[in-house]
Amino acid sequence: MSDKFTRFLPLHGKDYRGDTAHLTLEQHGAYILLLIDQWDKGKILCDDKNLRRVLMGAERTDAVQEVIQEFFVPDPHGSIQNMRLAREREHAKSIYERKVNAAKRVSAERNKKVDDRVSTESLQKVKKAIDTSDRIPVKSGSNDLAAVDYS
């Protein structure tokens, strides 16, 4: 499942071109697809079935294997990660979580203020209704409405 902060993959163009100038077109394509998958999921499972899915049905060729070996670090659980992208993802996640928490705090404060104001206003309306009900003059035996002062 993707988190909302993973909607946009950061790509630092100059860094990318500087680090990958030696790659072939096939290797560029594989590298970008692997980066996108890691950005979405956090890690890339390094089994043949998953890599074929990530690489859009293509086989893991020697050229693709070179990209994996050069740019990705394996972990003991059978997955790989590009370490710079992992740091970028953690940074984006922390920014997103800070913004979500700040929005929750602001919303809670706003709701508390509204609740306090509503309860105060409701209490004032009830008091005013009780005060004015005693002062409304009623004319007996007349079809005319009583002249009421609502001020």
Image: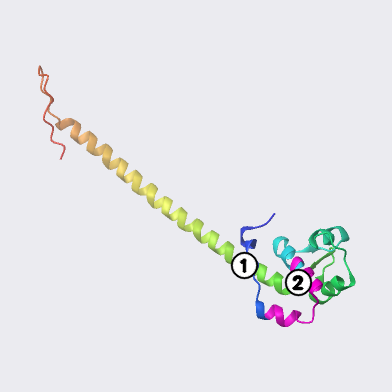
Q: Residue at x 48, y 57 (%)?
A: 105
From this view, report whether residue 127 is shown above or below residue 61. Answer: above
Q: Position of residue 81 (x, y in %)?
A: 77, 69
Q: Residue at x 75, y 79 (%)?
A: 20
Which residue type carries mark 1? Ala
Q: Which residues, given as a range, are shown in magenta?
A: 15-33
Residue 41 belongs to magenta span: no
Which residue lies under the disc numbered 2?
Answer: 82
Quadrant assignment for the C terminus? top left
Which residue lies under the disc numbered 1?
Answer: 92
Q: Position of residue 104 (x, y in %)?
A: 51, 56
Q: Residue at x 66, y 72 (%)?
A: 11
> How many numbered markers are drawn?
2
Query: Would you say residue 2 is visible in this rendering?
Result: yes
Which residue type carries mark 2? Asn
Question: Which one is in front, 107 or 27?
Answer: 27
Check disc 2: other Cα within 10 Å, few if <14, some if 14-19, many if 20+: many
Check disc 1: other Cα within 10 Å, few if <14, some if 14-19, many if 20+: some
Outermost residue to the front: 25
